Image: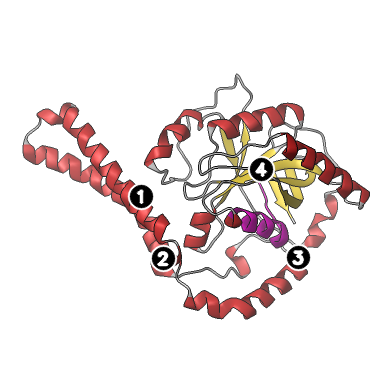
Amino acid sequence: MATLGGAHELLKMVVHACAGGTIEIMGLMQGKFQGESIIVRDAFALPVEGTETWVNAQADAYEYMVEYSTINKQAGRLENVVGWYHSHPGYRCWLSSIAVSTQMLNQQFQEPFLAVVIDPTRTGFAGKVDIGAFRTYPKDYKPPDEPVSEYQTIPLNKIEYFGVHFKQYYSLDITYFKSSLDSHLLDLLWNKYWVNTLSSSPLLGNRDYVSGQIFDLADKLEQAEGQLAHSRFGMLMPSQRKKEFDTILDMEKDELAPEIKEEEEGEIEYVEGDDIEMTDMDDMEDFEGFGDEDDNVKELYIF
């Protein structure tokens, strides 16, 4: 189980991802490891140059990591680097081949280590943070065949990259911690910007994303029709072929339905009460120091 708890750290990562726009960004998370949990206490951006499809740290970024960590310890922040995060603008949260290789390398030499992916485009469209936490399996490990826990609408031009590596890593559940100060600051922000929230439209602000989703759906339908025509169903009677194609059409339409539904239900979600699993900061007193290293990390805490 992964627990991201803390408005401050979460906002730092989301703001960084949104600032990158359609370009992928990258950063590191600091914290500590306890039992089967990774507790994140801070996050910072890295000076990397990414593209719309990949991001990778170079020599200057590694120098920045070392310098930042050293200055942090001199300032009294003793947390170690426990993971990295990057963005997937518009194509959901999963690990690409480069990300899988990076995470495997980090788990080999900096265990415990975590990978977090944020989709800033979908975050702005849906009004809630689209985030995922992942760790890779050992190199020769073969995971059991299990059904996907959550269906994701992967763009057609990314499906190949998603399908090749999805059995090389596993996702962690995410929960959150929020202090009384976090609650107060979020209330102040809401009181100041609630008018902007009501007057803005994610549909208009993300028109490129919405149109891209529609074109992607059209391409998938065209591809499905072509595959159907060349499959064994191509020899069926016209009425039977139409029935089979209508079934595929309904399945493809379902890909865009959740995003349309989110837009209809509201332009932003103001989370209160039980909408997010919150834990009292007093309950965190037991999390002191580092526990024994365990390859099967199940929890992530950010606060």
Q: Amino acid at mark 2?
A: Leu
Q: Is residue 218 magenta?
A: no
Identify the mark at residue 94; answer none if there is no mark: none
Residue under pointer 4 = 48
Question: How is this picture coloured?
Answer: secondary structure
Q: Amino acid at mark 4?
A: Val
**Main secondary structure type of the part rendered in magenta:** helix
Q: Secondary structure at mark 2?
A: helix
Residue 13 percent location from the top left of the image: 66, 54
Q: Is residue 247 above or below residue 126?
A: above
Eye-nearest disc, 2 or 4: 4
Residue under pointer 2 = 203
The residue that appears at 65% across and 33% down in the rendered structure is 103
User: Between 200 and 303, which is closer to the camera in this rendering?
Assistant: 200
Residue under pointer 1 = 255
Looking at the image, is mark 2 or mark 4 earlier in the sequence?
A: 4
Residue under pointer 3 = 179
